[in-house]
Image (cartoon, rainbow, N blue to C red):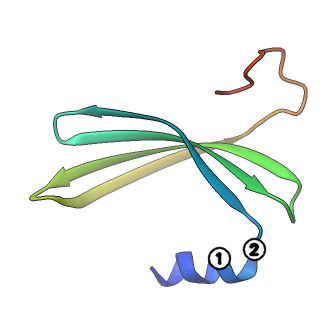
């Protein structure tokens, strides 16, 4: 929690927009678009969460910088 708070203080103009969620049993995957204004980069991030008893008990994430010249109409989303 402290790490997230410090990150928000150091980069207040960053945005985080959920693009898609997928649920299967005790797992949820969230595909998000992160915009880092200060660094002038956009990042596609996938968080995978495992739940137990209504709480998150494990979390994994992976991210990739979104190329500015993607040939796909919707980019990475």
Front residue of 65 and 22: 22
Q: What's the residue at 25%, 49% (across, down)?
A: 50
Left or right: where 76 falls relative to 38: left
Element class at badge 1? helix
Left or right: where 23 falls relative to 33: left
Q: Position of residue 42 (x, y in %)?
A: 77, 46
Q: Position of residue 66 (x, y in %)?
A: 76, 36
Q: What's the residue at 25%, 59% (across, down)?
A: 56
Element class at badge 2? loop
Q: Position of residue 74 (x, y in %)?
A: 73, 21
Residue 11, disc = 2
* Residue, disc 1: 8
Front residue of 6 and 18: 18
Depicted 31 relative to depicted 77: above or below: below
Quadrant housing residue 12 = bottom right
The quadrant of the picture occupied by the C terminus is top right
């Amino acid at each position: 929690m402290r790490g997230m708070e410090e990150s928000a203080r150091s980069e207040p103009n960053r945005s985080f927009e959920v693009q898609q969620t997928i649920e299967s049993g005790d797992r949820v995957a969230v595909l998000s678009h992160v915009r880092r204004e200060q660094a002038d980069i956009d990042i596609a991030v996938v968080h995978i969460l495992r739940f137990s008893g209504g709480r998150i008990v494990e979390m994994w994430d992976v991210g990739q910088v979104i190329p500015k010249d993607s040939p796909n109409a919707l980019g990475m989303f």
